[in-house]
Amino acid sequence: MTSTIVVALNRFLPEAEKIAGYIGADVKEYTPEIFSEIFPVADRIVAVMSMGIAVRKIAPLLSDKWKDPAIVIVSPDFRYAIPLVGGHHGANDLAKELQGIGLVPVITTATEAIGRDSVEGIAQRTGTVIANRDSTRAVNAALLDSDIPVHAVKGPALVLVDDQVSILARKGDYTVGVGCRKGVSSAEVEASLRQALADAGISPDQVSVFSTTAKKFGETGLREGVAAMSAPLIFLDDDTINAQEGLSPSKAKRIGLRGVAEPCALAVSKRKELLMKKKAYGRVTVAIAR
């Protein structure tokens, strides 16, 4: 099975076959259970049916726009391709791709509908990933009204931001949260990070970003140690850190935080999955997420 699936009512299967042949997809005949079956395995879904049918079946399955498949509805008259879910996450592009077989894409995401850029679009063009996904709502809203500055920072560097700044980092499946004791050296940090990645079977070039608390901004050893890893270091505010769930008990509550390494790794991760819980390497604590 490919990662793109075309679902159609029996009467629309010829149209579904035409779409599948054009975009290299599998075809599935509609059943009441079909969306439940394909949601876990499909990255993109084209549904040739009325939007009402699709909405009723898809709605209970939706969980997170960053995880849900991109879904495009093709109208039963085979005229329109309408992104239903994940416009910024592949559905708009899929609808536009279907122009090649004569369908008219109907784009409803606010930025694209009026010809403005979006954070997700910029990330796609630059081959980067959005490190702090919660920021995109505020930034995309601002893009609707005016051009906003884009700052390209070449490393070694550090970035300190609030929750209305989107960070586009190099592509990588993993994020690393880092905590440290006061006065830690750069050599200690670098050695600890390399050992933690080795323990997890991850190479440094698979890490998109490192993150820590803004309370550690003054730790020169931390900044220089991460700089040696050739990925950006992000300093997160307290609210972002404390919004994370599923954390191990931490002594960081003494400084008003639910933790450091684990929530920092989770906050900038794609799937919000903690792969390695916090682990101490001397005076450095490391956690890894994806």
Image: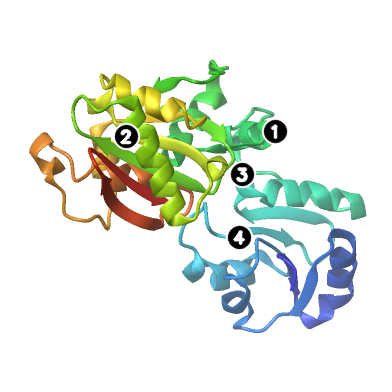
N-terminal of the pair, mark 2 or mark 1, is 1
Label 4 secondary element: loop
- Residue 161 visible in this rendered orientation of the protein: no
Front one among 206 and 146: 206
Q: Is residue 26 left or right of residue 213?
A: right
Real-space Cα separation, disc 3 to disc 2, in angstroms: 28 Å
Q: Secondary structure at mark 2?
A: strand
Badge nearest the viewer, 1 or 3:
1
Query: Which numbered mark, 3 or 2, is in the foreground of this view?
Result: 2
Q: Position of residue 102 (x, y in %)?
A: 91, 52
Secondary structure found at label 3: helix
Disc 1: which residue: 125
Q: CA distance from mark 2 to mark 1?
A: 28 Å
Query: Which residue is denoted by mark 4 in the rendering?
Result: 69
> Label 1: how many residues lie within 10 Å, few (<14), some (14-19) or many (20+)?
few
Residue designated by label 2: 212
